[in-house]
């Protein structure tokens, strides 16, 4: 089995909304679920978490599970980072034969 460092990783942050009286209960459910890491919460009912996944499908599975937890009024994706997409973009850059556009290589002056 490959080590975690060998696998491309997706990381996303979510804002979860619950009623103020349920903040501590929802935080307990989130921590017990193993689906995410809780980073911040306030007394108004907003909770900020991050989720990690092998791919977008894995992250969406976790998002739906969080949305289904008791007392969660809403859980919305705020930011997403995909290591796989970054790796693909870097490969595209590496495969560019001549990154300088023709117009900039011209020795003629206007």
Image (cartoon, rainbow, N blue to C red):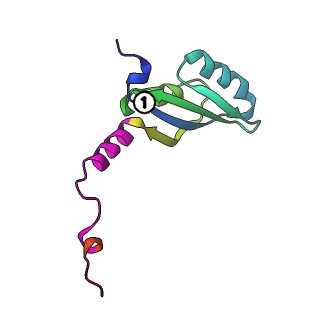
Residue at x 71%, y 34% (from the top left corner): 41
Q: Depth check: 2 or 62 in front?
A: 2
Task: Measuring from the top left, give residue 109's x and y in whole percent.
Answer: 29, 85
Q: Please, what is the dominant secondary structure of the magenta stretch?
A: helix
Q: Quadrant of the N terminus?
A: top left
Q: Is residue 100 above or below residue 79?
A: below
**Is residue 95 magenta-colored?**
yes
User: Which structural element holds mark 1?
Assistant: loop
Residue at x 38%, y 42% (from the top left corner): 86
Q: Is residue 64 above or below residue 81?
A: above
Task: Measuring from the top left, give residue 62's x and y in whole percent.
Answer: 47, 26
Viewed as shown, does residue 12 lie left or right of 85? right
Viewed as shown, does residue 89 lie left or right of 41? left
| Span shown in magenta | 84-103
Residue at x 25%, y 76% (from the top left corner): 106
Task: Measuring from the top left, give residue 77's x and y in whole percent.
Answer: 51, 40
**Residue matched to label 1:** 9
Viewed as shown, does residue 24 lie left or right of 8? right
**Is residue 35 magenta-colored?**
no
- Image quarter of residue 31: top right
């Amino acid at each position: 089995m490959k080590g975690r460092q060998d696998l491309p990783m997706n990381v996303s942050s979510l804002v979860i909304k619950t009623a103020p009286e349920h903040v501590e209960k929802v935080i307990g459910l989130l921590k017990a679920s193993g689906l995410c890491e809780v980073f911040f919460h306030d007394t108004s009912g907003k909770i900020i978490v991050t989720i990690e996944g092998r791919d977008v499908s894995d992250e969406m599975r976790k998002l739906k599970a969080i949305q289904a937890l008791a007392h969660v009024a809403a859980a919305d994706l705020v930011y997403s980072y995909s290591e796989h997409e970054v790796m693909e973009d870097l490969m595209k850059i590496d495969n560019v034969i001549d990154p300088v556009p023709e117009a900039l290589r011209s020795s003629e002056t206007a």
